[in-house]
Amino acid sequence: MTHSLSPAMFAVLLAAGIPAFAQQPPFTTTLYSARPAIGLSVIDKMATRQPPVEFTVTQPDGQKTTAVAEPVMNGERAGTVHYPSDFGNAGTHVGNYTWTARAAGKVVMTGRFAYRPSQDGQLLYVPR
């Protein structure tokens, strides 16, 4: 037994489905972080094996905190540390921060970032 759909019935079904489809909201992606974190990683493009990298972050009050990014995949990829979670005595306070990366005791890169308050009281990460 075969069923056939008349063109008129097909048009009614199609018309009935279009408004429901058209009213669907577009897909959106929302990123929410309860605590802002910064990933720090340095790669040596010339090296066949990545070294451990020590990151020192200086907080707005001058206090320093350190974490080591260990290479992954047997040294093929640079490691990453996340501020503040990988830094023992770290805090997230409004203000300017600086960081220094050292490999084998030598400074290989420096940078800075800041936390600023938002209108709703959250802290916002601001690259500088």
Image (cartoon, grey):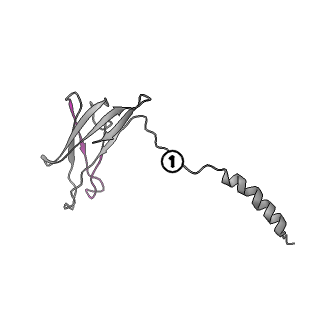
Q: Residue furthest right?
A: 1
Name which residue lies at 26% across and 30% down. Answer: 89
Q: Is residue 50 left or right of residue 20?
A: left
| Residue 15 is a magenta residue | no
Q: Nearer the viewer, residue 127 or 103?
A: 127
Placement of 20 over or under 33, stated as above or below: below
Name which residue lies at 24% across and 54% down. Answer: 43
Q: How many marks?
A: 1
Q: Quadrant of the N terminus?
A: bottom right
x and y, in percent, of residue 15 in the image: 76, 59
| Residue 79 is a magenta residue | yes
Q: Residues within 10 Å of mark 1 (few under 14, many from 20)?
A: few
Element on which disc 1 rests:
loop
Name which residue lies at 75% across and 61% down. Answer: 14
Dominant secondary structure (helix, strand or loop) of the stretch shown in magenta: loop
x and y, in percent, of residue 33 in the image: 43, 38
Type of the residue with mark 1 = Thr
Name which residue lies at 29% across and 47% down. Answer: 80
Placement of 4 over or under 94, stated as above or below: below
Q: Is residue 52 left or right of residue 120?
A: left
Does any portion of residue 14 appear in the rendered image? yes
Instruction: Write down the residue under mark 1.
Output: 29
- Residues in magenta? 63-80
Q: Nearer the viewer, residue 79 or 121?
A: 121
Q: Is residue 40 left or right of residue 3?
A: left
